[in-house]
Image (cartoon, grey):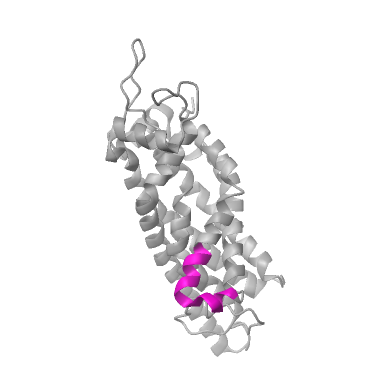
């Protein structure tokens, strides 16, 4: 979610760290962050081969997956709520041109963007669509972290791939792909809410359709564009954005967490810094796709 993902990365890094650590060394079920990522060679918990080892592996995997579901959902929801005004500014900047006084035909800058929202919509304007997005992100992050965890487990036990980076990339790719089917409808409603222009229309200018809340927006969208539009309008570009985004995210976090820098930063600072860095790694190369996605979804599908 644009600027939100950096903050989500900070909150969710604990969860992300726990999935990758279970692949790289023997650890307790608590799997303390950063301690689990030594830069030297590590012993896999998949060794041993006996019934006891399989039972331990299953228990650790189930615990890790449940932790991923819970931590991912909480992190996604809280991250969106805190950083949402920045996401609104990003969406407004992507779709607006000439909406601010004295900027006709030009892209408004950051300060003009804030001023326009404040004058026309007040503080509420920075949080249009936040409710459905917080609910949606709780589900989205749960899916992404759980799929990542389950895929890594499968690759560890059933695939002959030796490269940890390749395993993390595959897991991140699948997490991004599957979550796209939830991301697309949630962000469609979010973008329609954020892109509303509540300024007073000019003379002879038709008043735009305004939504009082997220559910009214979704209801209007379904009625006038159909269920197919809700789930499929912009789905293709969402998949194009999400697949590389989360491949970059999980690989970046995994590499950093296993580096010697983890020991230097310590258990508390490392997840914060690595989560932010992973957020940058996922958004810098995919931001152009995010702009295209916003411009596609802000338009009616018909």
Q: Position of residue 205 (x, y in %)?
A: 36, 14
Magenta-drawn stretch contains 264 = yes
Q: Is residue 63 visible?
A: no
In the rendered structure, the answer to whether residue 199 lies left or right of residue 291 reads: left
Which residue sits at x=29%, y=37%? 213
Q: Position of residue 130 (x, y in %)?
A: 34, 45
105 vs 290, nearest the viewer: 105
Q: What is the total number of numbered labels drawn onto the structure image?
A: 0
Magenta-drawn stretch contains 293 = no
Query: In this view, which residue lies farthest toward the top?
Result: 204
Q: Is residue 15 above or below residue 45?
A: above
Q: Main secondary structure of the magenta part?
A: helix
In the rendered structure, the answer to whether residue 268 lies left or right of residue 121 reads: right
Q: Position of residue 166 (x, y in %)?
A: 68, 65
What segment carries the magenta color?
261-275
Q: Position of residue 252 (x, y in %)?
A: 60, 63
46 vs 279, nearest the viewer: 279
Q: Is residue 4 above or below residue 104?
A: below
Which residue sits at x=44%, y=60%? 142
Q: Is residue 134 above or below residue 265?
A: above
Which residue sits at x=32%, y=37%? 125
104 vs 84, nearest the viewer: 104
Q: Is residue 189 visible?
A: yes
């Amino acid at each position: 979610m644009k600027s939100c993902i950096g903050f989500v990365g900070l909150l969710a890094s604990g969860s992300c760290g726990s999935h990758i650590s279970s692949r790289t060394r023997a650890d307790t079920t608590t799997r303390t962050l950063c301690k689990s990522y030594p830069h030297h060679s590590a012993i896999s918990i998949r060794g041993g081969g006996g019934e006891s080892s399989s039972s331990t592996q299953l228990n650790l995997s189930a615990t890790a997956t449940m932790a991923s579901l819970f931590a991912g959902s909480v992190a996604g929801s809280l991250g969106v709520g805190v950083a949402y005004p920045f996401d609104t500014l990003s969406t407004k900047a992507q779709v607006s041109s000439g909406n601010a006084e004295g900027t006709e035909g030009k892209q408004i800058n950051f300060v003009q963007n804030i001023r326009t929202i404040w004058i026309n919509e007040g503080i509420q304007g920075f949080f249009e669509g936040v409710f459905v997005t917080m609910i949606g992100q709780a589900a989205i992050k749960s899916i992404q972290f759980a799929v990542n965890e389950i895929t890594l487990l499968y690759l560890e036990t059933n695939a002959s791939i030796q490269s940890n980076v390749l395993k993390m990339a595959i897991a991140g790719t699948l997490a991004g792909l599957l979550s796209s089917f939830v991301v697309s409808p949630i962000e469609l409603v979010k973008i329609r809410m954020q892109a509303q222009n509540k300024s007073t229309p000019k003379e002879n200018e038709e008043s735009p359709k305004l939504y009082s809340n997220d559910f009214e927006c979704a209801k209007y969208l379904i009625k006038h564009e159909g269920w197919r539009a809700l789930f499929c309008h912009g789905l293709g570009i969402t998949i194009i954005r999400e697949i590389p985004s989360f491949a970059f995210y999980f690989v970046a976090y995994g590499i950093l967490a296993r580096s010697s820098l983890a020991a230097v930063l310590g258990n508390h600072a490392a997840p914060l810094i690595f989560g932010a860095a992973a957020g940058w790694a996922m958004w810098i190369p995919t931001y152009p796709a995010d702009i295209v996605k916003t411009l596609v979804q802000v338009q009616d599908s018909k």
